[in-house]
Image (cartoon, grey):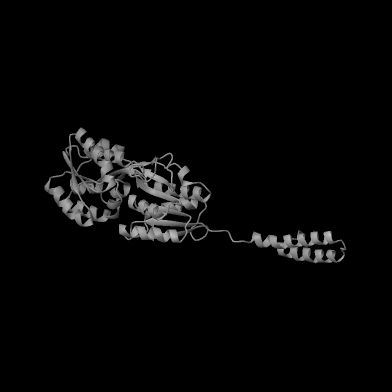
């Protein structure tokens, strides 16, 4: 029978033995050596039992609460051995669709001395985090053209304290124009929503206009500055006889997706979205990167940073997985027939 004895039990016996031995020692040097050995043995378990620091992650989002992408981020963390409330703490902060709250929430996370800040919600969210700190690492879960927006110096060498995943916004917006023409071959005029003061529109405009021109279409850019302009924007699109409306990747559009889709349905205007979720919720078609995959990849950045990597040395990743989704329910409601060759190219068809 094997006998298992605890460390504390062993130390008790060691103490007794040493004290007995020390009583027999007359040499001062041997006495001091014995005392040192005893003190070392007694201090060892206390050091070993020091609680391990649990990493604290700040999560900053512009929307009103959790969504599927947050689960993708948590799944990514769990795959790497991080479990919320056990091996990692996450400080969730949602701006309730009020962008002006982002700066104060970012400062709040800095005061909590989080180890990393993960941003969700595009340029305004990353900008708020960058203004709040230049030292705490920032991981972009999903942002449009991080270089073009000036959030990082370059994809290969981001510099500063920010890295993460970045979409190819201008290129993708041009592809959306092309897919609109393929899906609705007779379309000669298409509308798009544009915030004239927004950086995303400045990046997308030329690419979209060039793509439309090359396909013999006219692009009607309808300016909006806030959610209060959405209804009038769709009224103008109908008045101008637009045959579809394109919604490029935008944090603003994502925040007000439900309202935009309601207005598109009321206007009987085919809408083209930038991610699969748009088609799932009512767009005619959607094309863009897998956003869930971007959030899962953000978890790998958190892991590397917690293990000592510097954001400046972690290249920004571009998406590698894209989805083309067609909603046949919406097509039927609009009385549109999707060309067979377009259906064949779809990654997913919602029936």
Measuring from the top left, give residue 294's x and y in whole percent: 40, 46
Which residue sits at x=44%, y=57%?
58
Q: Is residue 340 visible?
A: yes
Please determine whether, in this image, residue 102 is positioned above or below residue 193.
Answer: below
Q: Is residue 351 visible?
A: no
Measuring from the top left, give residue 171's x and y in whole percent: 30, 38
Please determine whether, in this image, residue 273 is positioned above or below residue 258.
Answer: above
Q: Name the residue furthest top.
A: 214
Which residue sits at x=73%, y=65%?
9
| 106 sits left or right of 237 in the view | right
Measuring from the top left, give residue 335's x and y in whole percent: 18, 46
Measuring from the top left, give residue 48's x and y in whole percent: 65, 59
Q: Name the residue furthest front.
A: 28
Q: How many marks?
A: 0
Name the image quarter holding the N terminus: bottom right
Please determine whether, in this image, residue 119 is positioned above or below residue 337.
Answer: below
Q: Nearer the viewer, residue 48 or 335?
A: 48
Q: Name the residue furthest left.
A: 239
| 27 sits left or right of 160 in the view | right
| 116 sits left or right of 223 in the view | right
Q: Nearer the viewer, residue 217 or 165?
A: 165
Which residue sits at x=35%, y=47%?
143
């Amino acid at each position: 029978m094997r006998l298992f004895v605890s460390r504390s039990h062993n130390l008790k016996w060691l103490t007794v033995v040493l004290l007995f031995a020390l009583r027999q020692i007359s040499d001062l040097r041997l006495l001091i050596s014995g005392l040192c050995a005893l003190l070392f043995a007694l201090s060892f378990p206390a050091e070993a039992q020091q609680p391990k620091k649990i990493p604290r992650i700040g999560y900053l989002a512009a929307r009103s609460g959790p969504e599927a992408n947050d689960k993708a981020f948590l799944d990514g963390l769990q795959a790497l051995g991080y479990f919320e409330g056990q091996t990692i703490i996450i400080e969730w902060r949602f701006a309730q669709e009020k962008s002006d709250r982002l700066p104060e929430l970012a400062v709040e996370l800095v005061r909590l001395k989080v180890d990393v800040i993960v941003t969700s919600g595009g340029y305004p969210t990353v900008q708020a985090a960058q203004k709040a700190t230049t030292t705490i690492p920032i991981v972009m879960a999903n942002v449009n053209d991080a270089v073009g927006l000036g959030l990082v110096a370059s994809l290969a060498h981001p510099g500063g304290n920010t890295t993460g995943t970045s979409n190819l916004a201008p290129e993708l917006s041009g592809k959306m124009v092309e897919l609109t023409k393929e899906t609705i071959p007779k379309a000669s005029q298409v509308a798009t929503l544009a915030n004239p003061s927004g950086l995303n529109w400045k990046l997308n405009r030329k690419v979209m206009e060039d793509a439309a021109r090359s396909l013999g279409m006219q692009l009607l850019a309808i300016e909006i500055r806030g959610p209060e302009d959405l209804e009038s924007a769709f009224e103008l699109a109908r008045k101008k006889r637009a045959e579809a409306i394109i919604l490029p990747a935008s944090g603003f559009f994502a925040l007000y997706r439900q309202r935009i889709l309601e207005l598109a349905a009321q206007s009987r205007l085919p809408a083209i979205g930038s991610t699969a979720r748009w088609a799932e919720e009512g767009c005619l078609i959607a094309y863009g990167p897998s956003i869930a995959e971007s959030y899962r990849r953000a978890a790998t950045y958190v892991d590397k940073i917690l293990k000592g990597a510097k954001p400046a040395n972690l290249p920004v990743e571009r998406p590698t997985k894209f989805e083309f989704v067609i909603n046949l329910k919406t097509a039927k409601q609009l009385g549109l027939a999707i060309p067979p060759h377009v259906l064949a190219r779809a990654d997913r068809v919602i029936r």
